[in-house]
Image (spheres, coloured by chain):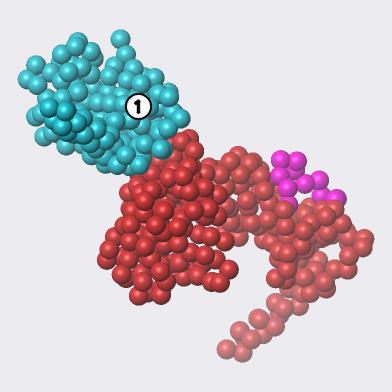
Chain colours: A cyan, B red
């Protein structure tokens, strides 16, 4: 089974890693700060690795080149952009999911079919306007 | 030429000052407020305060259609994002991405950036070339060490000296691109005769550079045959430590002894 990589173990990264682990997938979660792994479940079955994600060769050493899917959830958009490009273009990983705080960065991953960007800003805005429409109808 | 200089502190200042002229249109954008103020005073130019990887900031600074986009930020990935943005959204002709981690050079190039520079990488390259070659030889590596440009000063005792290029059977794996003589560049043709103190600029593959230098430095075994068309400058010919140069030493010895005896 191909492994799932989660890069960045913040709130979002940790909850994705927990969910993948619960589903029985083989997960590697990477963060430069060991204390961030406290967010993982007690029964987390995956493999937490302390690595600086800006050092791509360190990620290669722990086998990111053979990942089946990668979730990029670092707190730095530019780092996330680079990691998403590297995973999708250099390593040809079939599914690369990336979170961007700045929606304008999305243009730079357009046309790359294996990169799926997510923008919390847009998601919240769209959801809030839906909620407002719902309350107006009532 | 339109040049965008993104980020950077002292490097930015140096580049701004060297490109600041009427011919160039400079667009300078820097994410650090204190650096913006410092550069404004030091260079007397307009500087935008903003993040050079932000589409909005680059639009406000009018960074469209740059001939050259230079990213000098501290973070490698910031420079990566800025160069990608400049290429894809602002139609930059050429981007230069400066990186701190030499390992990023290869990765960034694979992801489509055309020039990636690491000072550590360059330093290591020049240390290696300085330490492996003689002082009269300089090498410059281009494009990830795939091309070597070698600069070599010709000494009169070399076999190739005083010979026309067409007569020396120069190795096929290399070529003489230019000869620098008396502050002038000579583009070599077969008839050009190599003179002492000529600086040869040679291009070859890095793996052939040692053999090339061996060839150039090979010393003359047979006496000099004057080249047909060219007149030899007399002074330089005398400097050649050819076998005939030993003659003046013989009369010199007695005079030295004579002075010693007087003491």
Q: Nearer the viewer, residue A121 or A135?
A: A135
Using residue B68 as the reference point, say whether residue A59 is left or right of it. Answer: left
Q: Nearer the viewer, residue B147 or A38?
A: A38
Q: Mark 1 Cα within 10 Å, few/some/many (few <14, many 20+)?
A: some
Residue B226 lies, in percent from the top left, at: 89, 62
Residue A85 occupies quadrant: top left
Q: Is residue A43 magenta?
A: no
**Given the image, what chain letter belongs to the residue carrying mark 1?**
A
Q: Regarding mark 1 in the picture, which secondary structure is present there?
A: strand
Q: Residue at x 33, y 61 (%)?
A: B49
Residue B42 occupies quadrant: bottom left
Vertical relation: A26 (above or below) B232: above
Using residue B256 as the reference point, say whether residue B55 is left or right of it. Answer: left
Q: Is residue B91 visible?
A: yes
Using residue B49 as the reference point, say whether residue A8 is left or right of it. Answer: left
Q: Residue at x 42, y 62 (%)?
A: B28
Residue assigned mark 1 = A116
Q: Residue furthest right?
A: B228
Q: Nearer the viewer, residue A67 or B161?
A: A67
Residue A70 occupies quadrant: top left
Q: Is residue B241 visible?
A: no
Q: Nearer the viewer, residue B235 or A12?
A: A12
| Residues in magenta, as a range | B166-176
Residue B154 lies, in percent from the top left, at: 70, 60
Q: Residue at x 66, y 81 (%)?
A: B256
Q: Residue at x 81, y 66 (%)?
A: B244
Quadrant where the N terminus of chain B lies? bottom right
Residue B126 lies, in percent from the top left, at: 49, 53
């Amino acid at each position: 089974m191909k492994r799932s990589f989660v890069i960045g173990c913040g709130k979002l990264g940790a909850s994705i890693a927990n969910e993948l682990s619960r589903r029985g997938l083989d997960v590697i979660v990477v963060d430069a700060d060991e204390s961030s792994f406290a967010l993982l479940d007690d029964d987390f079955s995956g493999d937490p690795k302390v690595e600086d994600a800006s050092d791509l060769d360190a990620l290669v050493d722990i086998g990111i080149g053979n990942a089946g899917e990668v979730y990029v959830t670092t707190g730095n958009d530019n780092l996330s952009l680079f990691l998403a490009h590297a995973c999708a273009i250099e390593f040809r990983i079939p599914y690369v999911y990336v979170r961007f705080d700045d929606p304008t960065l999305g243009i730079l991953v357009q046309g790359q079919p294996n990169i799926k960007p997510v923008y919390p800003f847009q998601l919240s805005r769209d959801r809030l306007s839906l909620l407002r429409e719902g309350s107006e109808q009532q | 030429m339109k040049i965008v200089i993104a980020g950077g502190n002292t490097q930015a200042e140096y580049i701004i000052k060297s490109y600041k002229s009427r011919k160039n249109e400079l667009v300078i954008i820097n994410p650090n407020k204190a650096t913006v103020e410092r550069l404004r005073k030091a260079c007397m130019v307009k500087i935008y305060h903003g993040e050079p990887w932000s589409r909005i900031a680059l639009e406000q600074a009018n960074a469209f259609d740059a001939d050259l986009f230079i990213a000098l930020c501290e973070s490698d990935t910031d420079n990566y994002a800025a160069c990608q943005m400049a290429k894809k959204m602002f139609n930059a002709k050429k981007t230069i991405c400066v990186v701190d981690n030499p390992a990023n050079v290869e990765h960034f190039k694979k992801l489509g950036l055309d020039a990636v520079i690491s000072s550590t990488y360059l330093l290591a390259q020049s240390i290696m070339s300085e330490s492996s070659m003689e002082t009269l030889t300089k090498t410059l590596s281009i494009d990830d060490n795939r091309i070597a440009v070698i600069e070599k000063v010709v000494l009169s005792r070399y076999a190739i000296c005083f010979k026309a290029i067409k007569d020396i059977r120069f190795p096929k794996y290399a070529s003489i691109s230019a000869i620098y003589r008396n502050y002038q560049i000579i583009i070599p043709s077969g008839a050009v005769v190599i003179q002492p103190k000529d600086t040869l600029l040679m291009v070859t593959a890095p793996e052939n550079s040692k053999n090339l230098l061996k060839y150039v430095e090979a010393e003359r075994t047979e006496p000099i045959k004057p080249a047909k068309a060219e007149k030899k400058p007399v002074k330089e010919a005398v400097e050649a430590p050819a076998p005939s140069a030993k003659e003046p030493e013989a009369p010199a010895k007695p005079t030295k002894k004579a002075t010693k005896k007087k003491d």
